[in-house]
Amino acid sequence: MDADPDLFRALGDATRRTILDELIDRDGQTLFEICGRLTMKHGLASSRQAVSQHLAVLEQAGLVHTRRQGRYKFHHVDTSPLRSIVERWPIHREDPDP
Amino acid sequence: MDADPDLFRALGDATRRTILDELIDRDGQTLFEICGRLTMKHGLASSRQAVSQHLAVLEQAGLVHTRRQGRYKFHHVDTSPLRSIVERWPIHREDPDP
DNA sequence: GGTATAGGCAAGTGCGCACTTGCCTGTCAA
DNA sequence: TTGACAGGCAAGTGCGCACTTGCCTATACC
């Protein structure tokens, strides 16, 4: 009945949504880069472990894919899971322009 | 930074998502109708108060509008708030058809 | 009027989840 | 090899949230 609870759970947290924003602004960041930008640009004093767990949730939802390279792990966004939302509840137009 | 936390909070619960499904299947239901259909069709033994609180969250998110008529209160879906999701994170195509 | 129906309000409870704390693994440069 | 750097794992904690419980208001039908 409910397709993917992981997707909605991932979107349920404000910090995770900001992480998505950051990854769209600059794709392929590492964990420490994301931590830094969250602190600098958004004033979110999130610890490294907190962000790491957030990224794990985003990855489980399929919104983020990871790529290992040496001791670095790059994170890439994938917005395609969001399509299931608008497919489940089609957005009817509000007739803004006559 | 974060436009509407209410929207994502509303979508975060599985019962609320099922309520949206039910209201799309049959718009303008009352509280008791929704309770009945949740129990019958989905096996969710949700109490009246629980569903009432769910509807309040959905209404606060703008996903449900209500219309009073006598002692009845009809609930109507409005999927337009979902547009902010795909506007915030545009869905790029996965090239499914070459 | 009286009663059943449809819904609302508010305090209390249990559990999931975000976050911390502490320690461990693996990679690169000196 | 040794140290710094990038990341992982697991147990513990605090709080928000879904749900219950109990009682109250208002509309409709007899």
Image (spheres, coloured by chain):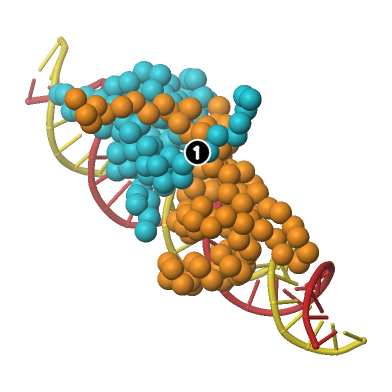
Chain colours: A cyan, B orange, C yellow, D red
Q: Residue at x 26, y 32 (%)?
A: A65
Q: Residue at x 32, y 21 (%)?
A: A27
**Circle 1 residue:** A91
Q: Residue at x 46, y 45 (%)?
A: A89
Q: Where's residue A83, x and y in %?
A: 37, 37
Q: Residue at x 57, y 55 (%)?
A: B27
User: Which amino acid lies under the numbered mark 1 shown in the image of this protein?
Assistant: Ile
Q: Nearer the viewer, residue C17 or D9?
A: C17
Q: Where's residue B92, x and y in %?
A: 34, 26
Left or right relative to A61: residue A91: right
Q: Which residue sits furthest front?
A: A98
Q: Nearer the viewer, residue A95 or A64?
A: A95
- Rendering quarter of residue A64: top left
Q: Where's residue C2, x and y in %?
A: 85, 89
For the C terminus of chain A, give its image quadrant: top right
Is residue A91 visible in this depiction of the protein? yes
Left or right relative to B82: residue C16: left
Q: Quick check: B72 above or below B17?
A: below
- Rendering quarter of residue A57: top left
- Rendering quarter of residue A67: top left
Count of marks, rendered view: 1
Q: Quick check: D12 above or below A48?
A: below
Q: Quick check: A72 above or below A59?
A: above
Q: Chain of mark 1?
A: A
For the N terminus of chain A, give its image quadrant: bottom left
Is residue B16 visible in this depiction of the protein? no
